Amino acid sequence: MAGSASESFEPLDWAALASEAAPALAAPAFTNPATGPTNPQALWRLFGRPKAEVRVTLYRDHHAWCPYCQKVWLWLEERRVPYRIRKVTMYCYGTKEPWYTELVRGGMLPALELDGRLITESDRILEALEAAFGPLGLGMNAREALPLRQLERQLFRAWCQWLCVPSRGMAEEARGQEGFDRFAERFATALSTNPGPFLLGELGTVDLIFVPYVERMNASLAYYKGYLLRDRHPAIDRWFHALEQRSTYLGTQSDFHTHAHDLPPQMGGCHASGTPEQRDLAQRIDAGPWPVVAPPGSDPETSQSEPADAAGVALARVLRHRKTLLARNPLGEAGLDWPLRCALTRLITGRACPPPAGSARGLRYLRDRISVPRDMPLHAARLLRRCLEATACLDPADPTAAGEPIPMQHRRDQDPSPFLTAANPSSGASL
């Protein structure tokens, strides 16, 4: 990816970059998100059925971040139940749509319409879906599933206690870790009870109940505690590895950076341990290098190797919202145009294109606001962040200039409303 430090190139223009993105734009994820692989941009998922037969509408968040939405989203994808998607803004990102608060008191997410009946609360939604379409594996209220669902809540509480309650010294910090480790090991033991990597022997609803928060535990504990969940618990790593063989999960999977910065306003704050290991890992998650742990094969975020089309996907996603990205950047449209083309040229060609003086803060603002999976998949986001950072480091005025800080109390810097006009509903896609 890196060009020679002694070489200097002008960036490709937008027409040339669009030509480079053409293969990615021709892929099913872009041309037909309703029937291609699982993706966060679709407004319909049909699985070969006509829209007239769709009985389900899922109301979920624009950012594809809400953990309870992810649980239902994954279930529908795994069972291949045709459904429509309507997207709603979460409160911490902006103003919730009035049409939704009129439909659902309090605006809670997710919600689901099944044959015209509105259902809220994710477990009630899954129960209704199982009754209508049959269970995924053993039903969520099967005798074997109930103690595992209780374990998921115990693991969740132990995680919250360690992550969200400030420690008064290292002794309390150690107790928080011990409490979490105890329930993480119980989860690992449950995963090892039956043959195969999944709970109860095969992928089922109970696995999907664990997925959203265990994914967020993996990310947040790395960033705030320097704790690598997959490394410490091999059975959990095998479970993640098996999930990552499924296009359904890959289409919903987020990354360390997105979760680490989206969680604080949702959880009421996340508290770092402050150890050297924690500070080093947080710095790597924010600014690279990625993957954050070497050597290859020990990647704590994913077992998947980088897809051949990752750079093209990243480029295509940027081009889709180019004008809005330029307009919302602190540098403004004129100020970011050349630096962004420098970064995208590096992404596609590997050539180093030094940006104008003063570009670093705008490039790092964008680097810090790539949202996975809303904007692009994990590996595409890594490549784009890497090229934005490498280009920022070439700023001749101040290569260390930081972008505008990421808010901790809210994420209104990620308000989706300015981007919605760029969507083309007729294609079956959105952000």
Image: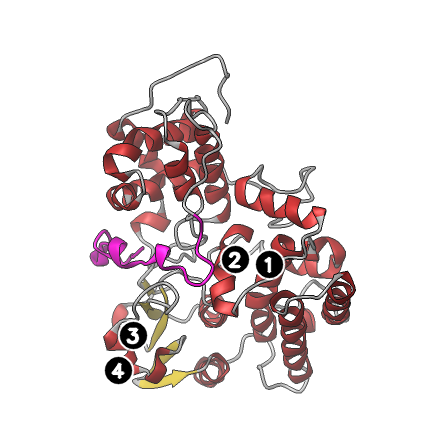
Q: Amino acid at mark 3?
A: Glu
Distance from the alpha carbon under mark 2 to that under mark 3: 36 Å
Q: Amino acid at mark 4?
A: Glu
Give coordinates of residue 120: x percent, y percent. 41, 83
Q: Give the mark nearest the N terminus, 4 or 2.
A: 4
Callout 3: helix, strand or loop?
Answer: helix
Distance from the alpha carbon under mark 4 to that under mark 1: 34 Å
**Residue picked out by circle 1:** 220
Callout 1: helix, strand or loop?
Answer: helix
**Residue picked out by circle 4:** 102
- How many neighbours does mark 3 have within 10 angstroms: few (below 14), some (14-19), or many (20 or more)? few
Please tell me in which quadrant of the rendered image residue 146 appears. Answer: bottom right
Q: Residue at x 71, y 63 (%)?
A: 196
The circle on residue 259 is: 2
Callout 2: helix, strand or loop?
Answer: helix
Residue 242 at least partly seen: no
Give coordinates of residue 350: x percent, y percent. 46, 24
Q: Amino acid at mark 2?
A: His
Is residue 164 a member of the stretch shown in magenta?
A: no
Q: What are the residue bounds of the magenta stretch?
A: 405-431
Which residue is most to the front? Answer: 168
**Residue picked out by circle 3:** 53
Give coordinates of residue 135: x percent, y percent. 53, 79
**Residue 139 to residue 193: above or below:** below
Check whether the beta carbons of the residues at disc 2 and disc 1 lie within 8 A of each other. Answer: yes
Q: Give the mark nearest the N terminus, 4 or 1.
A: 4
Distance from the alpha carbon under mark 2 to that under mark 1: 7 Å
Give the dominant element type of the magenta stretch: helix, strand or loop.
loop
